[in-house]
Amino acid sequence: MPPTDFDAIVVGSGITGGWAAKELTELGLRTLVLEAGRPIVPERDYVEHKPPWEMPFRGLGDRRATASRQSIQSHSVSFDELSHVFWTDDVDNPYTTPADRPFYWFRARQVGGKSIIWGRQVYRWSDLDFEANLRDGIAVDWPIRYADLAPWYDHVERFIGVSGQAEGLSQLPDGPFLPAMAMNCVEQHVRERMAQKFGRERILTIGRVANLTQAHHGRAPCHYCGPCHRGCITRSYFSSINATLPAARATGRLTLRPFSIVRGLIYDKERNRIAGVRIVDAQTKAEREYTARVVFLCASALESARILLNSGIGNSSDQVGRNIMDHIKWGGASGGIDGWTDRREIGERPNGIYVPRFRNVSSRHPDFIRGYGFQGGADRDGWRASLHAPGIGPAFKARLNSLGPWSMTFEGFGEMLPRAENRAAIHPTLADAWGIPSLHIDCKWSDNELAIHRDMNVAAAELLEAAGARDIRPSTRGPSTPGGTNHEMGTARMGRDPKTSVLNGWNQSWDVPNLFVTDGAAMTSSGCQNPSLTYMALTARACHHAVEQLKRGEL
Amino acid sequence: MERRELIRWLVATAGLRALDGLAPADLLALGRDVHRGAAAHAARRTLTGRAEQTVAIAAERIIPATDTPGATAAGVSDFIEKMLMDWHTPAEREHFLAGLSDLDARCRARSGRDFIDCAEADQVAVLIALDDAKQDWFARLKYLTVYGYCTSEVGQRALGLWPQPWRYDGCAPVDAAH
């Protein structure tokens, strides 16, 4: 019989589960990682170098299979004909929403989780974010400040490798960056023109991205092939598969069990401890139990909340499943930039530009609190611009080989406020393919998010105007669907009071002290930065705290 | 996030993103298609005989061989067959086939012969008229032709997109070699 008792159990092997596995094993704990999905073998499963003509639909996707099995997942920007295998099956994994309030729940079940398909943009938070709820009298105060997390940001960034440009901004602290990726000529031009017009208030910098620009801890630098979301055989971007799980395995203390769907936590009432975890084998549907001294939930924000709710554990505050947040997007603008017609990009840079938050930083906006950042970039159209162009014959064919003018795009990512009524609850009747009760998710934007979304168009147009753009086109799209940015968080928030929060300042359950939740569920507010870096830093910090408590006999 | 996706998010045209523009009934129809017998499915073809020749010739007129190979050498008509058979809805497929009949009718009106039997100049003239008229079935044929060509190995090599450069230069001269 393989062992069933461990020092620690980690539920999930994605971006935070991988970190928990690495930290806990390196700190000496025999650790079991339970992953709901299949194993990933890079040599077999990574397909980033497959050319388009080897895909049956040339990248347009298997429309029928998508319609029948992945009609929700297919809305993710990282979903395509090849990467669809890294997203879950919507039929086996159902959930519901009110008919008039759609919510996209993008999920990944395989070893590595969504760290295989993530966008890799990594930005630190600052006290502008950690103090925001207290300042605005919104929800509850974060129990930590930037100073608490700064050393853990360092710790994480040094390991994962982040390329970026230090800018010295208080609202977006710098880290130990690898050399920045290059901006193209038009992006450099826009940066300079923005600096002339806005000074330090609105700056344009190259994206901070977990793609390597030089060899790092045995991983090769990026070779600019493009589709990172299909895997990376050179391990040039950070994922659990590429970095943390190998580090955990090297300790000899890691046990990884794929196809292990957590049905619930086992509670020892006498000791008030989690005794272990009950799983169902995804393939055989057999049930198993594993025990440990400490349990980390790293299953993703909504899945971790679902496990807590299905287990009836950790919810004395009634905050589990509540306060769902995402980032609102689809506001912004594009514009044409004249010149540089003799220049083009070579290669696919897996990164764009970033305009750090500038609203409500040094002055107060009349219409909303908090703010947003812009991502985007400049490029020239290639053959795709000809798909709807007039003409046929030799002249039309020659056009396929020509490049269009440069255009510059800014897309906003806006903060969402925590609201108790944005809530996931256990569905009264619906269950997944393994009989585990599903979620009903009820979440919508508030007026503050909608005001932020409107302002994105205005401010992006101002940036393009400053850059001398012509034909400025503000976004005509309405707000994105909640969940659609795949930054869902907040469903088991940290706080200072057990009555109003699920976790203390160490991501530790107020109710059951050997239970930690370190994925996006722990977030007390949403910031506007891409959140994975903060999840990772919180995870590493919580692991060290848990091990100290174990050593002191407190768990 | 894939950068190309990010940069182009404002461009509403994108064309054939898998499920865009489909009504719930279409989605259900697509779903039902999946569950049909795969073996029977593989045997059927949408474009047979003269229809296949019509599409192959029309594609070559849209992207002819010049100093680089054209649509025929790139196997574009096989891609169009695959898309019609396994990607489009039955209604879209019927609409496309009706378009091919319309193409023959226009050729007969012009020169007394079906499209594949016309002189090349007549074929080109009829296709240009359809293009100018923005006939939506022709727009689909043209989209599939351009897409199929540009994503084929022949097309990718002709356009200098393959092999990939495996480096990044954000400000390279337009005529720079990889």
Image (cartoon, coloured by chain):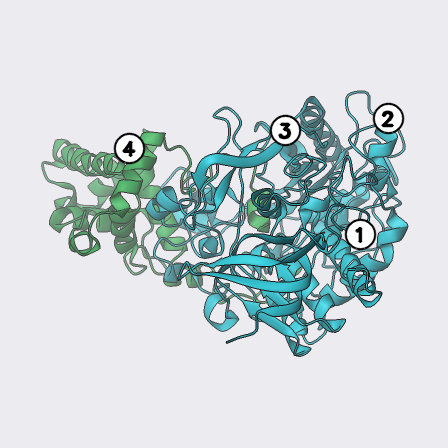
Circle 3: residue type:
Pro
Kind of residue indicated by mark 4: Ala
User: Looking at numbered disc 2 in the image, what kind of residue is underneath it?
Assistant: Arg
In the image, which disc is placed on residue A474? 3
Give the chain letter at badge 1. A
Q: Identify the residue shown where x is 76% and y is 71%.
A: A27
Q: Which residue is mark 4?
A: B129
**Tags 4 and 1 both on a single chain:** no
Chain A representation colour:
cyan
- Give yes or no for contact between labels 4 and 1 (Cβ–Cβ under 8 Å): no
Q: Alpha-carbon distance for marks 2 and 3? A: 23 Å
- Can you see residue A235? no
- Cα–Cα gap, marks 4 and 1: 70 Å
Question: To which residue does mark 2 refer?
Answer: A364
Left or right: residue B66 versus residue A275 is: left
User: Which colour denotes chain B?
Assistant: green
Q: Quarter of the image containing the C terminus of chain A?
A: bottom right
Q: Residue A307 got which mark? A: none
**Considering only order in the chain, which callout, 1 or 3, is on the residue closer to the N terminus?**
3
Instruction: Name the residue beneath numbered marker 1.
Output: A506
